[in-house]
Every structure is written in structure tokens, then in C-alpha cells.
Amino acid sequence: MQSMISRAHAEVKELRQSIELLKAEGEKLEKSALHAEEQFLHGRTKLRHAGKQIRNVIQSAYKIEIRAGGLKDILGELPKRETSLFRSQVSKLASEAKKEKNTMSKEISKISNYGISV
């Protein structure tokens, strides 16, 4: 009888230790999850902010394209010999602005695909 009680005490003690280890591991994992959540939220905020900045760059590129188009119209009214160099430079700049706008639009799509509204 005494040995059974002794064994029961040992089992209870072992179970308590297991529970304490379980609690400690649970607290550690909870802290880890909380830290990961904070990093996630911070990263999401940074992505949203970057997305807004990219939107501004896209808007600027769009404005450059419009201005380049207007300048090409003005240059079209002038003698071709004097304006051919300007015309090619303006076309090149408009093309670069369009390329940058398209690249930035792809970045916006990537951010949106993460479920982050921009």
C-alpha cells in the first residue's frame, strides 16, 4: 500500500513538472508569436507606406508623359531641322517615364497581392 502511495506521489510530481514545462513552453511560444505579429504589422505598415510613395512616383511619371506629349506638339509646329534633336530627346524621356511607370505599377501589384491596400 505504501509503495502504491509513493508511486502515486512520484507520478503526480512528474505530471506537475510536465505541466510546468508545458506552461513555460507555451509562454515562450506566445511571446514568439506576439513578436512575429508585431513584425508582421510593422512590415505591413512599411509596405503600405512604400506603396503610397510608389503611387506618387507613378503619378509623377504620368505627368512627365503628359508634359512630354505637349512639348512634342509644340516642337511639331517648329521647323524640323532645328527641333529634331529635341524631339528625339523628348521621345526618349517620355519612353523612360513610361517604362518607370510600368515598373512601379508592377510593384504596386505585388504589394496588392499580399492583401495590402495602397
Image (tube, rainbow, N blue to C red):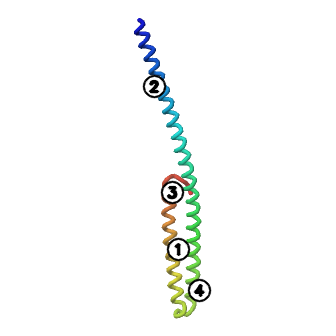
- In the picture, which quadrant includes the N terminus? top left
Sequence-wise, the earlier of marks 4 and 2 is 2
Sequence-wise, the earlier of marks 3 and 4 is 4
Q: Kindly state the secondary structure of the residue where label 4 is placed.
A: helix
Sequence-wise, the earlier of marks 4 and 1 is 4
Q: Check the image and name the residue furthest to the top.
A: 1
**Residue 59: % across, % down:** 58, 68
Sequence-wise, the earlier of marks 3 and 2 is 2
**Residue 10: % across, % down:** 43, 16
From the viewer's perspective, is residue 38 above or below residue 16? below
Q: Which kind of residue does numbered mark 1 sit on?
A: Ala
Q: Kindly state the secondary structure of the residue where label 1 is placed.
A: helix
Query: At 57% across and 91% down in the image, what residue appears?
Result: 78
Nearer the observer, disc 4 or disc 2? 2
Q: Which residue position is annotated with label 4? A: 74
Q: Which residue position is annotated with label 1? A: 97
**Residue 84: % across, % down:** 51, 89
Q: Classify 10 Å Cα crowding around label 1: few (below 14), some (14-19), many (20 and above).
A: many
CA separation in Å, label 3 and label 4: 39 Å
Nearer the observer, disc 2 or disc 1? 2
